[in-house]
Image (cartoon, grey):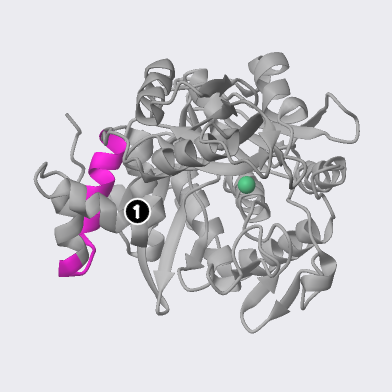
Amino acid sequence: MRRVFPFTLLAASLPVFCQTPDWSKVNPEAMRHFQALVQIDSTDPPGNETHVAEYVKKVLEAEGFQATLAAKDPARANLIVRLKGNGSKKPLLIMGHSDTVRVDPSKWTFPPFSATRQGGYVYGRGTLDDKSDLLAATMTMLLLKRSKIPLDRDVIFVSEVGEEAATAPGIEYLVNERWNDIQAEICLAEAGGVRRSNGQAQYAMVETTEKQPKGARLIAKGPSGHGSRPLRSNAVVHLARAVEKIAAWDPPMRFNDTTRYYFEKLATLSTPEDAARYKGLFDPQKAPAIREYLAEHDPIAYSMLHTSVSPNIIQGGFQVNVIPSEAEATLDIRALPDENISAFYDMMRKVINDPAVELVPDTRNQRPGAAPSPIDSDAYRAVESAYKKIYGVSTLPLMQTGATDMAFLRAKGVHCYGVGAMTDLEDGPKGFGPHSDQERILEEALYKHVQFFWEAVRSIAASKN
Ligand SMILES: [Zn+2]
């Protein structure tokens, strides 16, 4: 039971450190550091993220922090900084990745590492993915230190390398060789965010789980022969048929806590037509037709309903007058977190139903599977209230169809929540999204993201009594 104090007494006893930062002073400081971070070229490969780590190290050390470079490869240093709490709760990890995907500079209106401010936006590689999170986490450390807020748990900051290409010097190194330095109960990292449409924030999304990248190859074999004498047994024909069957297949639908809640809540925020569709997914009579609609019109929602298969590479034959004896297709499979993948491969074999086509599981690029982070935890609720406070919107838990480094942390039992800045729904198709040739962030979104991050971290880590 919580004791109730008369309001006046409570107000009078509020210590100075509970006061909100002066955002009019924090914003220009945040923008300065953000532009500096974007101006450091850390495209991966090769990464060279040490330049980013050194910048952040300098900023944090100037404030009295002790910051440690943690590197498997000296050119690719992670940065670890810890702000001590009283230890009554286990640490909170806040993380942003310091690398970005590469650029084709000829496609950019503003040079990709200029961090040009124009029309209320900042343009540059990494403005959304992921230097905005890196900046928000950095600023939160500064603000925590300045405010002297007593903490129930340590807050650990990590600037992480290698998220976009090879995970070996980044999350794998941190989890396998620096675990004592980063071990935490809760983690905030990338992959969520606030969706704005027509200039209005609509809802926030928090990534609580993600699909697991898997793969397979289909190998069709048949007798080779002279191209002038077609064969029914042609490997290319068998492969094409198998690919067609797999692509047209609607794999079994299954919800988990995150996706069930996502579609239920999305229905309450949608137009009547969309709402009926999302609700209909729970009705076995209506669901097949709705899945077909989503497959056509909303591939993200459709992919969230089941383990998905996409044929992305196809190879076969070498000369026009030769019937080849072999043809091969490479499939990108994104499995639900709890999928029994060998049973799924067996289902695919039944769908293909052709002894001339062999399915070979691909074991490369494996990420650990893990249970979704809970959506009934204090940390989730803290993130939800921070989004409500800063943007006035509801939060949906999200199962990311892609993959992030949080998979490695969730596999170690950390409850990870993927957050992010506000973006315009209309921006992606126009080519301004993450990884695009004109990546950009709203200045307002950057400021709000810092405020959101501060609110969420304070609420998760600050002493409650
Ligand atoms: Zn990213």
**Which residue occupies 77% across, 44% down?**
319
Considering every residue shown, the one lying at the far right of the view is 74
In the foreground, 261 or 247: 247
**Which residue occupies 52% across, 53% down?**
420
Q: Is mark 1 within 8 Å of ligand 1?
A: no
Count of numbered labels shown in the rendering? 1
In the image, residue 12 sits, relative to residue 335, either above or below, namely below
Q: Secondary structure at mark 1?
A: helix
Q: Is residue 154 left or right of residue 160?
A: left
In the foreground, 367 or 351: 351
Corner quadrant of residue 24: bottom right
Q: Name the amino acid, label 1.
A: Ala
In the foreground, 316 or 336: 316
**Which residue occupies 56% across, 21% down?**
360
In the image, residue 439 sits, relative to residue 118, either above or below, namely above
Picture coordinates of residue 203, whole percent (x, y): 34, 61
Picture coordinates of residue 387, whole percent (x, y): 39, 55
| Residue behind mark 1 | 295
Looking at the rendering, the stretch of residues picked out in magenta corresponds to 257-273
Q: Is residue 436 left or right of residue 60?
A: left
Residue 258 among those drawn in magenta: yes
Q: Residues within 10 Å of mark 1 (few under 14, many from 20)?
A: some
Report whether residue 236 is seen: yes
In the foreground, 427 or 419: 427
